[in-house]
Amino acid sequence: MIRVENLEVVFAPGTQDETAALKNVNLRLERGDFLTIIGSNGAGKTTLYNAIAGTLPLSNGRIFIREEGDVAAERDVTREAEYRRARYIGRIFQNPLLGTAGRMSLEDNMMICHKKGYKGLKISLNKAMRDYFREALRTLGMGLENRLHDNVELFSGGQRQALTLLMTVMSKPSLLLLDEHTAALDPHNAEMIMDLTLRFASEYRLTVMMITHNMAHALGFGNRLLMMDSGEIIMDVNAAEKTRLSAQDIVQRFRDIKNRDLENDKMLLS
C-alpha cells in the first residue's frame, strides 16, 4: 500500500526559472492495485516516480508505505533515503540495460537482487541457491536457466528486461514502478514483457504503477487510470468506468478539462 499526500516538487525556487513540477498531488493505492498513468511529456509522471522512490527531495508533502506482509500501521518514508526505500520499492526503466549489470554473470545479478534488504545470516551462492535461481528463470521460457554463468551483456534487450522484471518481483516489493518499460522493445518483446508483467502482478499480488504512452495498454491493463498534466492529476478513472472508455474519449476529456481551465483563467483575469 502507498499513500502520497499533498506532494509538491518545485525546481529552482525563488528564481526566474522556478518551475512547479508537482502540484498538490494526492494518491492512494491498496495492495493489488494496478494503476496506469498517461500524460504528455513534462506532465510530471517521472517526477512523481522520482519523488516516491526518493530520487528527488520534496518541496512539500508526505509519503506513506505499508511494507509487504506488514500488519502494522503505514510508515512515513518521506525523509528516508533512496537506498532505504529500494528495499520495498522496485523500479523498471524504459532502457532494458539499466536494470542489470551487463559485465556480471546472470547468477551474480540474481544474487545481488536476492540479498537486497536481507538482514539475516550471510547467504552464499551455493548449489541450493543456483537451483532456486534456475527454477525461477525457467518460468520465463527463454532458456536462461541454462546460462547462469554467462554475462548479462550477452543477452538481448527483451531477455534483459524480462530478467529485470523477474529479479524485481522476486525481491517482493511493496510497490512496483514501471516507467514505460516496454517502449524501447520491438512489438514481439513488448507483448512478451506485458504478459509477464500481468502474470507476476497477479501471482505476487503486486501493487503496480505503470507509465505508458500506449493508449491500448493504458485502457486495457490495470484497474485504474490516471492522467497527469502540468504536475497535477487531472483525471482518475476506476476500473468500471475505464472499460467503457476509448482512446478518443480520453482525448476529448483532456480537451474539455483544458478548455475549462482556460475559461477559469479568463474569469480570474477579467
Image: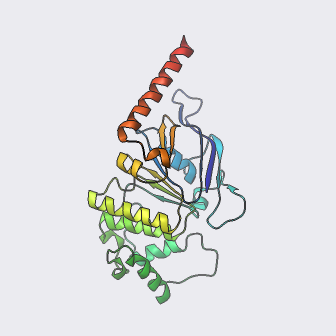
Query: In what quadrant of the picture does the N terminus appear?
Result: bottom right
| Residue furthest out toward the right | 72
Residue at image x 70%, y 65%? 71
The quarter holding residue 221 reads bottom left
Residue at image x 27%, y 61%? 188
Residue at image x 43%, y 66%? 199
Query: In what quadrant of the picture does the C terminus appear?
Result: top right
Position of residue 109 in the picture relative to residue 190 (left or right): right
Q: Position of residue 237 (x, y in %)?
A: 50, 43
Q: Is residue 5 above or below residue 96?
A: above
User: Toward the viewer: 189 or 200?
Assistant: 200
Q: Is residue 3 above or below residue 112?
A: above
The quarter holding residue 99 reads bottom left
Position of residue 131 in the picture relative to residue 119 (left or right): left
Q: Position of residue 95 (x, y in %)?
A: 37, 56
The quarter holding residue 27 reads top right
Q: Position of residue 121 (x, y in %)?
A: 63, 81
Position of residue 239 in the picture relative to residue 147 (left or right): right
Number of on-image labels: 0
Position of residue 32 in the picture relative to residue 217 (left or right): right
Residue at image x 59%, y 59%? 85
Q: Is residue 64 above or below residue 141?
A: above
Residue 39 visible in the snapshot:
yes
Q: Position of residue 253 (x, y in %)?
A: 43, 33
Q: Is residue 222 above or below residue 154?
A: above
